[in-house]
Amino acid sequence: MGLSKSSEKFAKISVESVVSFLDKLYPVKNSEIWDFPGLIIGSADWEVDKILYAVDPTVEVIDEAVEKNCNFIFTHHPLFFQAQHQFSSASFRGRIANQLIDKRISLYCGHTNVDKSKDGASFSLAKELNLKNIISLNDYADNSADNYSEANAANFHAKRTSASDNYLAVSGDLKSEQTLEELLKNLSFLIPKTPSPLRCSGQKNKKIKKAVIISGSGDYILNSDEAIQTNFFGADVFISSDLRHHPVLDFRQTYPNVAVIDVPHFSGEYICLGNIKDNIEKSLGAAGILSNIITDPYNFTSLDLAK
Ligand SMILES: [Zn+2]
């Protein structure tokens, strides 16, 4: 592949220049109220030789960065979802933080600030599917994916933003109609494979034209007032991740004609990493690689069992 060779032509740059570039593209102030993206570990004056792009800041991803001589890691998901009061090695988050500091590896998280842009996961998946007429459903998206706190669901109606660009939730039209089965097959080819399968609810031969997409955990939208008022935005299918039994069951009972596809959370969001990598490489000349680590926590299913 010659990654190490090609990286030699890239100049060394500072953490500060990468962070300020990212903040211009994906302002941290645009992130959801519960989300705290930005530079998590590191110092403005540290150097950046090579960047590793990953979905999650796991122990394995940090090891990969060390092994591949990357001293800056961009992850989609945060290391910390909640306020922390200790960073000791008693917790895995503390161990990760300490290891990063020891090795002088910076960690940057680009989460809902990135997902609100056209480089984010929902818009990227819409582009992968070659959808046209992609629009934001921003009024409906403000309590979006990856929010661990149930309490925040109560804020759904209170947290709408006036940001014009908010692509946490999008809708778009397939260039030509596909059956649900065809769409499922196409989608499974477009996203990275993990041991977790894509799951589908609907009739296989149902014709699909319009899709609503929310990257990450999007089932909050299924039975929302807005979905009911708009007949689920006139869509034929909803594509998202981490979709729970009751929201989907209730939704399918309410809208038997709207199908649901649950893609593995990791796969649906990995695809947006290439956008950030391309932007940084083109504008700053910082070498980078996409992580090879699958951070889907499920590593086999009953489909893999010996018969
Ligand atoms: Zn996510």
Image (cartoon, rainbow, N blue to C red):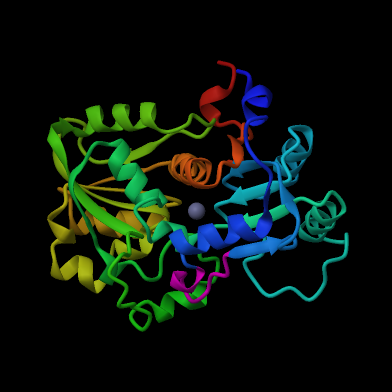
The total of numbered circles placed on residues is 0
Instruction: Say which quarter of the image contains residue 285.
Output: top right
| Residue 227 % position (x, y) | 21, 65
Relative height, residue 151 to residue 23 (above, below) = below
State which quarter of the image contains the C terminus: top right
Magenta stretch holds residue 33:
yes
Instruction: Say which quarter of the image contains residue 291.
Output: top right
Relative height, residue 79 to residue 188 (above, below) = below
Pick whichever, 299 or 293, lies toward us. 293
Residue at image x 18%, y 55%?
Answer: 255
| Residue 290 % position (x, y) | 57, 35
Q: Is residue 172 left or right of residue 146?
A: left
Pick whichever, 180 or 23, lies toward us. 23
| Residue 95 % position (x, y) | 83, 55
Magenta stretch holds residue 88:
no
Residue numbers of the magenta segment = 28-37
Pick whichever, 141 or 128, lies toward us. 128
Res 115 visible: yes
Instruction: Say which quarter of the image contains residue 250.
Output: bottom left
